[in-house]
Image (cartoon, grey):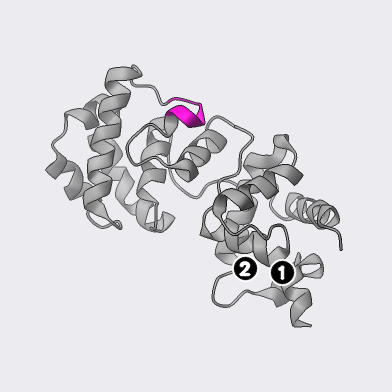
Amino acid sequence: MRKSERYTLMMRYFQEAMPQAASELHFQNPFQLLVAVMLSAQCTDKRVNMVTPALFEAYPTPASMAAASLEDILALVKSVSYPNSKALHLKQTATILAEKFDGQVPSDIPTLMTLPGVGHKTANVVAAVWFDAPVIAVDTHVFRVSHRMGLSDGRTPDAVEADLEAYIPEEIRPLAHHWLILHGRYVCTARKPACEKCGAAVFCRYFSSKR
């Protein structure tokens, strides 16, 4: 099967199976989304969603978080992975947003990546989820699913991102980002993919190789 055909089948399947796919992180504005995504690095969305209600209540704006002590922020995020560095990055980023961006989260990826603790993947997520930018963030789920389904053979997240964006139309890239993440999280899992329950198995390279 040609790669273009596999992409066409994949997009058709996901559009029918998950037409309303969305982030599982809880947020109400771009600042909350940025904070949640920063906390989610190497941490589950479930854990982040347990932490953020109290964090957002205590610090609803960049200015309020910038004014907080590092110790107080750390106390609220201590149950996530790498809490010390994340607490520091949150305070630093909040300070920059308050002082240089009038409390607003920038919409463009290069500017987002100038914020402490915001790498390419985090910037892509924020840009795609809130600002509907035509980009796809490649996390471990997207990387794994893309390889298994035969959507990319890229050796790095950047290479996989380039393949996905070369074949997936701009208007559905933000949605495709969620399709791949959720498929990897609940169906095409790392240890034991549920191929027998997967509606995409018929055009999946991994499934075909097992038959």
Is 156 colored magenta in this rendering? no
Nearest the viewer among 158 and 12 is: 158
- Report whether 70 appears left or right of 3: left
- Report whether 80 appears left or right of 204: left
Among the two numbered marks 1 and 2 on one chain, the one whose residue lies closer to the N terminus: 2
Q: Which residue is mark 2?
A: 188
Name the quadrant of the C terminus. Answer: bottom right
Q: Are marks 1 and 2 in contact (CB under 8 Å)?
A: yes
Q: Secondary structure at mark 2?
A: loop
- Write the residue at 60% across / 32% down: 133
In the rendered image, is residue 57 in sight?
A: yes
Q: Name the outermost residue toward the bottom.
A: 211
Q: Residues within 10 Å of mark 1 (few under 14, many from 20)?
A: some
- Write the residue at 67% across / 41% down: 173
Q: Secondary structure at mark 1?
A: loop
Nearest the viewer among 1 and 170 is: 1
Nearest the viewer among 57 and 141 is: 141
Tell me the CA gap for discs 1 and 2.
Answer: 8 Å
Q: Is residue 184 above or below residue 176?
A: below
Nearest the viewer among 8 and 26 is: 8
> Residue 123, position in %: x, y?
47, 38
Q: Which residue is mark 1?
A: 198
In which image quadrant can residue 196 be found?
A: bottom right
Q: Amino acid at mark 1?
A: Cys
Q: Amino acid at mark 2?
A: Cys
- Report whether 144 appears left or right of 19: left
**Of the two numbered discs 1 and 2 in the rendering, the one whose residue sits closer to the viewer:** 2
> Residue 186, position in %: x, y?
58, 65
User: What segment carries the magenta color?
Assistant: 106-111
Q: Residues within 10 Å of mark 2 (few under 14, many from 20)?
A: many
- Report whether 197 appears left or right of 87: right
